[in-house]
Image (tube, rainbow, N blue to C red):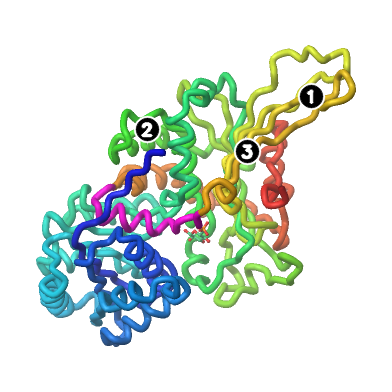
Amino acid sequence: MVCVEQPAGPTGLIVFGASGDLTSGKLLPSLFDLYRRELISENFYILGCGRTEMSDEQFSQFAAEAIEKDAGKAADHAKKFTQKCHFINGDYDDAAFYEKLKNRIEELNRQHKVESNLIFYLSVPPFLYPVVVAQLGAGGLVSPESKLVVEKPFGHDLQSAQQLNEIISRTFRESQVYRIDHYLGKETVQNILMFRFANAIFEPIWNRNYIDHIQITIAESSGIGHRAGYYDENGALRDMFQNHVLQMLALVAMEPPTSFEADRVRDEKIKLLRAIRPIGFEPWSAQIVKGRYTAGQIDGKDVCGYLQEKGIPADSQTETYIAAKLLIDNWRWRGVPFYVRSGKRLAAKDTEIVITFRHVPHSMFLSAGLEELPPNILTLQIQPQEGISLQFQAKQPGSKICMSTLDMRFNYADVFAVQMPEAYSRLLLDAMLGDQTLFNRYDSVETAWKLLAPVLQKWQDSDIPLYEYPAGAQSFAAADNLIESDGRKWQPIGISQQK
Ligand code: BG6
């Protein structure tokens, strides 16, 4: 076994928007996890910033509650960790706040013996990103060693993403910027690279000669939670497709990077994203379909439709489901369709990449009526029930010709007796260490938006139907047509959970 994990050196983490759900739900528990595993130095502090008035003690208490469920096993660590949590409040657009912030950082650097590794983490509403970045620059808070972590959404369209990149570049060099796509921090997503490039047997068949098509699914059974405002402005295309779906596609389809270094990996991803054929030819319904959930049932419970969710305007046209057929114009993938889909309130939570191989070129079992043998199917189960499975045909004991499809399966939970680490632990540690491999570079974000530009335009200019599906559904007719008109079928959602 080869395991390489480097602990981070002294660091100060300054979180803008620290009283929000992301901090309590993801950042604090992930940081505590790193601290407990001694991957964060004792010389570390978190300085939460927000508009809410909060004392250091109150923020420490907020942190204690956020890590409560993990603290039981490590009470000493928990106490020391919460003592590293501080808070400062002010208005993000007020220069005086940054003056105060600068002094506080200097004081905390002395107290916690941190020299220069400062991370500014933007967890504020996106309209504030440019404001905070510009103020940090103007206030002289940024040194060449500082880093900026930016949460998604990064832009609302191509133009706003370009603008944001431009504003950031006035204060930070690209090597200081960490654009988050939390899917890249998931173990199973990182495993795509190991699976493809640390084994000799897959890469030779990973191309148009052997693969018939690939499906990428991110299905969620949950709805929009308390994020009506954010979600209604964005919808599935911006919320999931522009980032998570395209990033997974890039990892599955890119060429082998020469080394596991940030820019080598990111160079290959961007080449792949650039090779995706622009969406935008007729008929649109054969390329992209959108839907919205109506009332239905999930796990036996009634749930309301999207338009009945609290905070959603009655005339909303926002999609909660997107399915698309993408083609990649390069030698490896020419003619191999990638069917991708993501939706809320579907039958189950299920993220998977399904690679269907071509049929055998000739069946020698014709005499037994076996004209077309089922193809091999490789499934990379991203979550839940993380694992990998390969379907193949095998002889069943008994009759002379008796064949059935077998499933060779590896489950992370059965093999590794550890809980899957939270994606944010990986990403936070990498940001502290200055490793950008699992973060998006400016060009990859812009290229993804460029791909969506014609779709957003078309949706604005004309009446592209917004189909409805009942909550709890597997799919709906228009989404099925997208793939079935090519003679293929969606893999059922949630099937891995039943195995
Ligand atoms: C976020 C989206 O990026 O990813 C959410 O904004 C979505 O709408 C979430 O629910 C899904 O993440 P995960 O890790 O639960 O698959």
Report how far apart the C-alphas of labels 3 and 1 lie in the structure.
Answer: 19 Å
Type of secondary structure dominating the magenta stretch: helix
State the image coordinates of residue 234 (x, y, percent, origin top left): 48, 61
Q: Which amino acid type is marked by label 3?
A: Ser
* Image: 14 above or below 361: below
Picture quadrant of residue 255: top left
Badge 3 or badge 1: first in the primary sequence? 3
In this rendered view, identify the residue nearer to me: 409 or 272. 409
Picture quadrant of residue 349: bottom right
The answer to whether residue 253 is left or right of residue 115 is right
- Residue on which disc 1 sits: 395
> Is label 3 in contact with label 2 (beta carbons under 8 Å)?
no
Label 1's element?
Answer: strand
Mark 1 sits near ligand 1, with its Cβ under 8 Å away: no
- Residue on which disc 3 sits: 389
> Which numbered mark, 3 or 2, is in the foreground of this view?
3
Label 3's element?
Answer: strand
Q: Residues in magenta?
A: 418-435
The quarter of the rendered structure image containing the N terminus is top left
> Is label 1 in contact with label 2 (beta carbons under 8 Å)?
no
Report how far apart the C-alphas of labels 3 and 2 lie in the structure.
Answer: 29 Å
Mark 3 sits near ligand 1, with its Cβ under 8 Å away: no
Residue 277 makes an appearance in the image: no
Report how far apart the C-alphas of labels 1 and 2 lie in the structure.
Answer: 42 Å
> Which numbered mark, 3 or 1, is in the foreground of this view?
1
As for residue 423 lying within the magenta part, the answer is yes
Label 2's element?
Answer: helix
Residue 318 makes an appearance in the image: yes
